[in-house]
Image (spheres, rainbow, N blue to C red):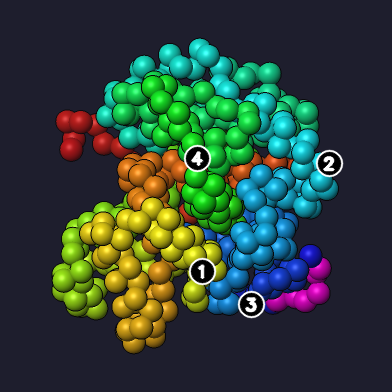
Amino acid sequence: MAEEKAARLHLAGKDYDLAVLSPTAGPDVVDIRKLYGEAGVFTYDPGFTSTASCDSTITYIDGDKGELWYRGYPIEQLAAQSHYLEVCYLLLYGELPTPDQLVDFETRITRHTMVHEQMHYFFRGFRRDSHPMATMVGVVGAMSAFYHDSIDINDPVQREIASIRLIAKVPTIAAMAYKYSLGQPFVYPRNELDYASNFLHMCFSVPAEPYNVDPALARAMDRIFTLHADHEQNASTSTVRLAGSSGANPFACIAAGIACLWGPAHGGANQACLEMLREIGSVERIPEFIARAKDKNDPFRLMGFGHRVYKNFDPRAKVMKESADEVLDLLGVHNNPTLQVAKELEKIALEDEYFVSKKLYPNVDFYSGIILEAMGFPTSMFTPIFALSRTVGWISQWKEMIADPQNKIGRPRQLYVGSPRRDYKPLDAR
C-alpha cells in the first residue's frame, strides 16, 4: 500500500490536505483519520459502503469484473484444483502449504474435531425445535468456558490453538445441532475421513447401520466450504472484527459472527431462496412470479439472483453451478418439484432480457441451496453450513486485526438528529 497522491477538502474557508492511499488492487482510498482532529467534522456513510475500516491482505473482490481472490489466488482456480483445508491454510498463513505443511495442518485439524464431552449436556438446555443457528451461537460462545487455556489474545500460541480448535470443532457442533433437532444420537467424528466427508458422516449416519459417504457429494460439500470461506469485509466479518477490537476472546468473536450471519439478508439468503422456490411450487407458475418480480409496485423479489457487491456474474456461482449439475445427476432427483422450478428459473434468468440487462444472474446462494436440498439437508441447516465454512475467514480476519499495530477499538460516529438540549421538567409540571 503506497501513499502516492493527495486530496484537498475545502471547508468553511479552509483547505485540508488528505492523503490518498493506493492499494495492490482496487480503487484508491482517501485517508480521513485526521479529519475530525483537524477540521472538526465527521464523514457520513450509512452501511459503510464507501468506507474502508481496515487494510487487509486476505481477500479481494472486484464486483464489476466478477472477481474474488483469496490471498491473490482466483477462487475459480482454488475451487477446481485445491480443497478446503488447503484453502484454510492459505487464508490463515498467507501462502499455499508445502506437502509437509499440509499434512501437519490436516493432522492438527483432524485431531481436534472432538468436542469436550461435557458440551454434550449443554445441548440439552435447548428445545428440540430450536433453530440450529440459535444452538450454534450459544454453544460456540460457550467454548470459552471449556477451552479457557486458549483465550489470551495477547499470546500468539493461544491464538493459534484457538484457531485450530474453531476450524476443527465448529463442524462437529453444527452436526450435533442438526442431530439434536432430529432427536437422533450425536455421531462422533472419524479421523480416517477427510473434512467434508467427516461432516456428512456426522450429519447423516446413525449407529444402527453403516454409512458410506459418496466421494462426489463430499467433493461438492468441500466446494461449498471453499467458496464460502471468506468474502472480504461483509457484515459478519465486520462484526467479528468489531467484537475483537474490544479484546473479546476468539470464541465470543466467532459467536458474534454467527449471530450476524443468521440474518436473512446475509447468511440466510440461500434458505430464503429455497423457500421462494417452494412458494412458486411448479414450473407452470414461474411466469406469474417473473411478472411479479418485474412489477415495481409488487414487493415480491426473486431471491438468489444478483448480488450487492457483484455487478457481474458471481464468480462463485459459476463453480457452484457445475457442482449443482453433478449432484443432481448423481442423485437422480430431477423429479423433485422444487429443483425443477430452480432449473427452469435459472434458464429463464440467463436468457430473459430484463434479468440480463440488470445483471440479475443466479448467485452462489441460488446454487448452494439447490445442492444442499438435493443432499437431504433441511433449509434450517443451510446457514449453519455457511457458518462453519466462513469460520476460517473470520479467524483469519481476527488474527490479522489482533496483529495489526494500528488496531484500536471500533467506535463509529453518528449524525445526531434528535432533540436539541432541553431541561428536565418535574412530573407535576408536564
- Residue 405 place in picture, x, y as percent: 78, 45
Mark toward the start of the polypeptide (3 vs 1): 3
Q: Are marks 2 and 4 in contact (CB under 8 Å)?
A: no
- Residue 215 is left or right of residue 369, and the answer is right
Mark toward the start of the polypeptide (2 vs 1): 2
Disc sitting over residue 100 in the figure = 2
Quick one: 282 or 207, which is closer to the camera? 207
Disc sitting over residue 10 in the figure = 3
**Gap between marks 3 and 4, in whole Å?**
64 Å
Q: Is residue 283 above or below residue 112?
A: below
Mark toward the start of the polypeptide (3 vs 4): 3
Disc sitting over residue 318 in the figure = 1
Can residue 69 be seen at all in this image of the molecule? no
Task: Give the magenta range.
Answer: 2-7
Instruction: State which mark lies toward you, 3 or 4.
Output: 4
Q: Residue at x 67, y 72 (%)?
A: 26
Q: Quadrant of the C terminus?
A: top left
